[in-house]
Image (cartoon, rainbow, N blue to C red):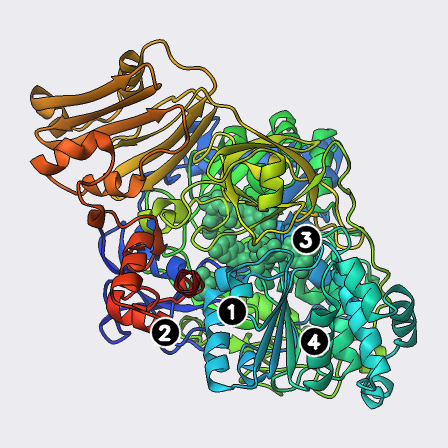
Amino acid sequence: MSSAPFSNPSLTRENGAIATTCPYCGVGCGILAAARGPESADIKGDPEHPSNFGRLCSKGSSLGETLSLETRLLYPEINGRRVSWDDALTTVANTFQRIIETHGPDAVAFYVSGQLLTEDYYVANKLMKGYIGSGNIDTNSRLCMSSTVAAQKRAFGEDVVPGCYEDLQLADLVVLVGSNAAWCHPILFQRLLAAKRENRRLKIVNIDPRRTATSQSADLHLPIRPGTDAVLFNGLLNYLRQHDSIDFGFLEKHLGLYAEAFETARKTAPSLPAVARICGISEEDLATFYQWFARTEKTVTLWSQGVNQSSSGTDKVNSIINVHLATGRIGKPGMGPFSLTGQPNAMGGREVGGLANQLAAHLDIENPEHRNLVQTFWNAPRIAEKPGLKAVEMFRAIAGGRIKAIWIMATNPAVSLPDSNAVRDALGRCEFVVVSECESGTDLSQYAHVSLPALAWGEKDGTVTNSERRISRQRAFLPPPGEAKPDWWIISRVAQRMGYGDDFNYQSAWEIFVEHARLSGFRNNGERVFDISGLAELDRAGYDALKPIQWPVNQCHPNGVPRLFDGGGFSFPGRRARMVPVLPKAPANLPDSAYPLVLNTGRIRDQWHTMTRTGKSARLTKHLPEPYAELNPHDAARYAVPDGSLVRLESRFGQALVRARVTEDQQRGAVFVPMHWSGPYANKGLINALVNPAVDPVSGEPESKHTPIRIEPYRAAWYGFALSRDPLHAIEVDYRITTRGDGYWLYELAHSEPPPDWAAWVRELRAQPSGSSESASTKRAYAEEEWLQFADPYSGRYRCALLHSGRLQFCIFIDRSFELPPRSWLAGLFGLDRVPDRTRMSLLAGKPASAEDDQGPIVCSCFSVGINTLKRAIRKQNLTTAEQIGAALKAGTNCGSCIPEIKSLLQG
Ligand SMILES: Nc1nc2c(c(=O)[nH]1)N[C@H]1C(S)=C(S)[C@@H](COP(=O)(O)OP(=O)(O)OC[C@H]3O[C@@H](n4cnc5c(=O)[nH]c(N)nc54)[C@H](O)[C@@H]3O)O[C@H]1N2
Ligand SMILES: Nc1nc2c(c(=O)[nH]1)N[C@H]1C(S)=C(S)[C@@H](COP(=O)(O)OP(=O)(O)OC[C@H]3O[C@@H](n4cnc5c(=O)[nH]c(N)nc54)[C@H](O)[C@@H]3O)O[C@H]1N2
Ligand code: SF4
Ligand SMILES: [Mo]
C-alpha cells in the first residue's frame, strides 16, 4: 500500500524541481515536481506560490499517481488505426476545408475546454473566428461559468472578477452560495478556515439545498428550496434598503441604472415571511443571515455551480452582484462578489474569447469596431460576423446535420453535456468528428474519426489563469510520450495545411503568449480592464521565469492588480456599473406526479469530472468508490429504497442505476448524484443521461442542478463484488462498477437473473480474451493454484477465492442481499505476497478473525486512514478534536479536506 502522497518533502527549485501549476481546480495551486521515471513524479506544494503557499489538497497531492501511460493515446489514429501525424493533420485540414467550401464556415465547429492552456485556446479561437470565419467555437465553460460571464458583463460592462483570495482572510463575513468549496476548492477553503481561527468575528454562511462538507464548517447553513436563490438575494436587497444599509453615495457616483432593481426586489421579495416561505427555510435563520449581511461591511460572497447551472443562472448571479453594488462593497480589502471558477483555465479561456459569443481580449463579437480591431491585429482574411452556437445548441445542430464536422479538444461532451443520449446520437451521426485527447478508451473515443494525441499535464508548457485573475505558468517536467504533441501545435499545423501558414507559424507557447498579450493592449486606451500588454515584451527567458501575476498588467500596473473597481472604474460608458433588475424564475422543469423528485448533480472530493486522471489513483478512488444517489430518509422509506441498496433513477431523458445513500443531509424531494462516472468505470452511472437540456436564455448554461426524476428500488436476483489482480473482461450484468486499487481491481456487481452455475460463470469471468496480458509469472504459478469455494444454493450465497502459490489472485462474493462483507479488508490482502494461514481460514468469511484488522472505508485519502481506524482511536484514546486525531493518526494533517468528515465522526 502506498504511503503519504507528497513523497518528497525535500523538493526545492535548487535541487532541480520544476515549478508548475495544478491542472485541476480554479484555485490554481503552485506545485513543485520532479520526474521519477517517465510515469511518475515527486510532487509537493510550492511554498512560494501565492495561491497555496505550499499546501495541496488530496487531488493535487496525488498527481504523481496519475501519470501512468497505460491508457494514454500516444499516436494519431484514423478510424482507430495508427497513422502518421502528416496523414492525420492533412485529413483534418482537407475535410474541414471541403466541408467549408461546400456548406460554408458555419457547417464546422470546435468544442474546446477550460482545461486547455491559454496558448492552445488562443490559437483555436484565432483559427475559427479569424480564418475559418465562423463563431462556432464554444467551450465546456458554457456548462460552468457562462452565467457568471454574462452577469458580470451586464453589471460591470466586462467579465471581471473584482477581488482576490486575500479578501477571504480580511473579511468578517463570507457567504458561500451554491458552492461546496470544502470539496471543490479545498485549499482556498482551508485558507478561509485558517482565517476563521485567527479572526473570531469571521462568520461563514452557506446557502445550499443540501448539507455538505462546506455547510458543516459554516456558522449558518440555509438549506433553501432548490432554485430559489434569486428570491433570497432580492429579499436581501430589499432588507438592506429597509434597514438603511444602502450606499447611495456609491450608487450615484458609479452606477448608471439601479432604481428598477430595488423596485423589482421589493415586488418579488417583499418581506421576511414571504422570502422564508418561498425559500423553504425558517424566518429566524433568514433574519440572522440578513442581519449579519446588513451590519458587516467586510463581506465577500462566493458562488459557484449551484448558482450558475440554472435556467436563470445569469439573473441569480446579478441578484448577488446587486447586493454588493448597493452596499458599495466591491473592490475593497475583504469585500466583494467573488465567482469561484471551476477549471484550471476557465479564466484564460474567457480572456482569449473562447466562448461562441465573445471575441478575443474581452472584445464583443457584435461590435463592428471590435471585430475590426481583432481582424486588423491578426491581419486575418475574415472575422466571425455573429456569435456562434452555444454548446447545447451546437450539438443539436450536429444532430440536425447543420454542423457536419466538429473538433473536440480536452473535454468529453458524451459524458458532461446534459441529455447525453441525444449528444451521443448526434456524434454518431456526425460526418466528421476529430478528438484531441490525452487518453484512449473514453466514452467519446468511439465517435472519433480522427484521434489526435495531446501532451498532458506534466508534459506541456504554457499559462493558466485562476479564480483571482492570477496568471501562472505550467511547465513541463516529463518528456513527451509516444508522438503526443501540444494542443497549440496540433491546431496551428492544421491551420497551416488549410492555407494560413504565416499566421500560424508558431514554434513555441511563448510566441503565442506574447501575441495574446499584445492584442490585449492593442487600441485599448484603458477601456478594457483585461490588459496584459505589460507582458508583451517578455523574451523567452522572461516567459519561462514568469512569476504568478494578477491581471491587469500594463504600464500603470507593471506588477499586476489584486483588486479592481475600488472607487468605480467599471467598463460601461462613464466608467459606470449597473444593477440589473432580477425577476426570479422557477426552474425550467418542475416535478410532477410522474417525476416527483428533483435531481441535483455535482462533485465529490477526490474525483475530477470524467475521472480520466483521478480514476487512475487508487488512493483517490477509495473515498467514494461507487456512484450513488443521496436521498432523504423520508423519500427512502416512501419509495422503499434502503440505505446501501441499488436504486433506479429515471427522468424523461434517460436512466441510471446507482447505490442509495440515505441521509438527513438531503432535503425531502431532492436527490443528489455525482457527475463523475462514465463507461470505463460504471455501466449505468452516467447521470447526464437523465439531466434535462434546459438552458439559461442569456448565457446558454444548462440547468445541471435541477431535473425532475422518479426513483424505484432495483430488484436484483443477486448482488456481489469481485476483487482481481488482473482486470476482468466483459462482465455482462445489470450493474457493474470498476475501480482501481493498489494491485487489484474491484468490481461491484448486481444482476436480475442468476447464472445457472456459479463455478462455470466465474471461470468465464476469469477467462482472458486471446492476446491479453496475463503475466508469465502468473501462468507459471498456475501449477500451484488453489481454489477455495463455498456455495449454498439455499441462501443464494456463493463465495470463492483463488490463490497462486499462496498469493491472493481473485475472490468473489455473491449474495441475495446487498449486505456483503466489507471490501477494504479483502482488498488489503492483495498487498501481501502470501496470505497467512490464519487469514486463509477466514478468507471466505470475508472478514478478519479479529475486527481490529479492518480499517474500513477510507476517510483521509492523503494518509489512507479508514473509518474503523478513526472510530476505534476516538473510542479507545478518548479523542475529542480533529487536532488530537491528527496527532494520533496523521489523518487530516495534509490537505485538511477530510476534516469535516472527521468532525462528524467525533460528534456521532
Ligand atoms: N473535487 C473536485 N473539485 C472540483 C471539480 C471536480 O470535478 N472535483 N471540478 C471543478 C469545476 S470545473 C467546477 S465548475 C467547480 C464546481 O464547484 P461547486 O459549484 O462548488 O460544485 P458542485 O458540486 O457542482 O455544486 C455546488 C453545490 O451547488 C448546490 N446546489 C444545487 N442546487 C442549488 C440551488 O438551487 N441553490 C444553491 N444555492 N445551491 C445549489 C449543490 O447541492 C452543490 O453542493 O469545482 C471544481 N473543483
Ligand atoms: N450533470 C452535470 N454535468 C456537468 C456538471 C455538473 O455539475 N453536473 N458540471 C459541468 C462543468 S462545470 C464542467 S467544467 C464540465 C466538465 O466536463 P468535461 O470537460 O467533459 O470533463 P473532463 O473529464 O475534465 O474532460 C477533460 C478531457 O480532456 C482530457 N484532457 C486533459 N488534459 C488535456 C489536454 O491538455 N489536452 C487535451 N486535448 N485533452 C486533455 C481529459 O483526458 C478528459 O477526457 O462538466 C459539466 N457537466
Ligand atoms: S485546491 Fe487542490 S485541486 Fe485545486 S488547484 Fe489546489 S491542489 Fe489542485
Ligand atoms: Mo466547471
User: Residue 661: horizontal and vertical position, in percent?
Assistant: 50, 43
Task: Work out how far the residue at label 1 is from the one at label 2, CA to CA, in angstroms.
Answer: 23 Å
**Which tag is nearer the camera, tag 2 or tag 4?**
4
Marker disc for residue 217: 1
Task: Work out how far the residue at label 4 is from the one at label 3, CA to CA, in angstroms.
Answer: 27 Å
Q: Are marks 2 and 4 in contact (CB under 8 Å)?
A: no
* Residue count near mark 2 (Cα–Cα under 10 Å), binned few <14, some 14–19, many ≥20: some
In the image, 19: left or right of 577? Answer: left
Which circle's residue, 4 or 3, is located before the other in the chain?
A: 4
**Which tag is nearer the camera, tag 1 or tag 2?**
1
* Residue count near mark 1 (Cα–Cα under 10 Å), binned few <14, some 14–19, many ≥20: some
Cβ at disc 4 under 8 Å from ligand 1: no
Which of the pair 149/176 is nearer the observer?
176
What secondary structure is marked by label 4? helix
**Which tag is nearer the camera, tag 4 or tag 1?**
4
Task: Work out how far the residue at label 4 is from the one at label 1, CA to CA, in angstroms.
Answer: 17 Å
**Mark 1 belongs to which amino acid?**
Ser
Residue tagged by mark 3? Answer: 309
**Mark 2 belongs to which amino acid?**
Gly
Cβ at disc 3 under 8 Å from ligand 2: yes
Which circle's residue, 2 or 3, is located before the other in the chain?
A: 2
Q: Quadrant of residue 783?
A: top left
